[in-house]
Image (cartoon, rainbow, N blue to C red):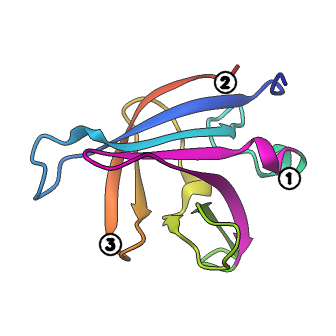
Amino acid sequence: MQLPDGFKRIVLHLARSKTHPEGSARFGYELVVPLTAEGRIDAALWATHKADCRVRRFRNGESDSLGRVVHRAGGERGARWIFDYDRSTEFDDEAGYRLGDHVFAPGEYVSIRDEENEMHTFRVVTVTDAA
């Protein structure tokens, strides 16, 4: 199935941190989500194509985790974006910090709270059309 215009494939790599002073391309995410012309997640297009919005988490030495990108009520501004790897639970596997406000463009940074409740910063490496 062809995705509508506006859907992008976004690759995030771990940014510099105490444990990875140079960052790491071996820890990150690949997202397929719709973006607005400004580069922000398009919640309206997401709402009509929820099943097409997905995430792949990759970590050195672990199998990839595949899931959905979900917009849920709650959070600071009344809604938040989460990565759901297990549809059988209501547990939010990972949550982005204000992902709806961020511009997804190469060189920009986003923060994601992992399943251990630790916040990590990731750098946007590429944004390409999702085919």
Extent of the magenta region:
49-73
The residue where tag 1 is placed is: 47
Q: Which is more N-terminal, label 2 or label 3?
A: 3
| Crowd rating for badge 2 (residues with CA inside 10 Å; few <14, some 14–19, many 20+) | some
| Residue plotted at (61% across, 53% down) | 67
Instruction: Determine whether 28 is above or below 81 in the image.
Output: above
Q: Position of residue 104 (x, y in %)?
A: 53, 38
| Residue plotted at (67% across, 24% down) | 130
Q: Report the amino acid beneath label 3.
A: Glu
Q: Report the amino acid beneath label 1.
A: Ala
Instruction: Determine whether 107 is above or below 5 in the image.
Output: below
Q: Which is more N-terminal, label 1 or label 3?
A: 1
| Residue 57 inside the magenta-drawn segment | yes
Q: Position of residue 102 (x, y in %)?
A: 53, 49
Q: Report the amino acid beneath label 2.
A: Ala
The residue where tag 2 is placed is: 130
| Crowd rating for badge 3 (residues with CA inside 10 Å; few <14, some 14–19, many 20+) | few
